[in-house]
Amino acid sequence: MLQYQAPLEEFNFLAHKVLRLSELLPLLPEHHHIDVDLFKATLEVGAELTQEQLLPLNGSGDAEGCRLEQGGVKTPQGFKSAYRLFQENGWPALTVPLSIGGQGFPGTAGVFFDEMLASTNLSFSIFANVREGVLRCVDRFGDERVRSLFSDKLASGEWLGTMCLTEPQAGSDLGLIRTTAVTQSDGSYLLSGTKIFISNGDHDLTENIVHLVLARTEGAPAGTGGLSLFVVPKYQLEVPASANGVSVIALEHKHGIRANATCALAFENARGYRVGELNRGLACMFLLMNSARLAVGVQTVGLAEVAYQNALRYTQERLQGRALNGATHPDQPADPLLSHIGVKSSLVQQRLFIEPARLLCAWVGTLLDEARC
């Protein structure tokens, strides 16, 4: 069975001895209310949540997978109740700024918490992580109307989000996007098109899903310079639970992270609202994409950490041959794998990746805090 122990001592060492957050935070208006004790205590509670609630769902969730039924995608057993606990205890708002209803913790706290999420349940962490990038896009580039409609729900985690870029004919070349957005008299738009490979594309964790969609308005220039960004809810805002023209065509079949729904979506006159200036959608979307890049790096560290912990445990327990420099456990029929130089070398190489990668992610978190303040 997969085992995991959050490296809290390592987190706190990096935060307070290497990055010296205790000196930095008082200088940042958004984070001056966070002290060392609160930082440590919060990570301890986060470790308890991830180890006790999410780790047990990891294997079972991947085995069961998400399934497409009439009415939408259903997540594996236990995910809905786990997300409810996650949301009710305020974790989605951990690093959301105080000014938009968050708790205002520094980015480094978010990096460490996200690492624990990835170590214990990568599928769940993907559901949880995209939302904040969507929120920051809406808050930075959306007008007052858009912010009033979406910011509070995204900040609290009542609604989750997606980023919808890729289309069947447009992968890395986003200039080939065909999804259209037609202006309406009330200032909204009707979007039509197909998007594929959409993480969190549909699920039953929240009452609504907020899609950030790249599309092309009438008369827009060809290429990426003609793309605008729109926020499109799964359900109509005026009539809760009433369809808004967004449907799931299919679930993508994957080798892993099967408990997260990667979908092909159809937009058929789906009502959306523009975020940012016309034809500047890709520039706006890069705010979310840059956030996603850090998140993927953190997920990599989280997976490497849990892999290392379980590899170490196995090499301590598994008996195999005798060590070259003499038996380390002469009272047993063989020595543990950990006694062999080659095995030790492999484990050391893992640590040589994990430790600097974790520090790099945490450092980027502090740089983002400084830039935002």
Image (cartoon, rainbow, N blue to C red):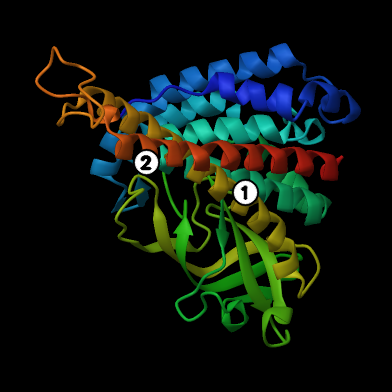
User: In the picture, residue 356 is in which quadrant?
Assistant: top right
Tag 2, which secondary structure?
Answer: helix
What amino acid type is highlighted by mark number 2?
Ser
The residue identified by callout 2 is 346
Q: Which is more toward the observer, 296 or 223?
A: 296
Q: Residue 10's spot in the image, x, y percent?
A: 58, 24
Q: Is residue 369 left or right of residue 113?
A: right
Q: Which is more toward the observer, 35 or 364?
A: 364
> Residue at position x 57%, y 76% from top?
179
Does the CB distance between marks 1 and 2 fall below 8 Å? no
Q: Residue 43's spot in the image, x, y percent?
A: 59, 20
In the rendered image, the vertical position of residue 232 relative to residue 337, given as above or below: below
Quadrant of the image containing the N terminus = top left
The residue identified by callout 1 is 294
Q: Residue 66's spot in the image, x, y percent?
A: 32, 47
What amino acid type is highlighted by mark number 1?
Leu
In the rendered image, the vertical position of residue 95 relative to residue 292, given as above or below: above
Tag 1, which secondary structure?
Answer: helix
Is residue 159 something one can see in this rendering?
no
Q: Residues within 10 Å of mark 1 (few under 14, many from 20)?
A: some
Q: Residues within 10 Å of mark 2 (few under 14, many from 20)?
A: few
> Residue at position x 46%, y 25% from top?
50
Q: Residue 154's spot in the image, x, y percent?
A: 64, 41
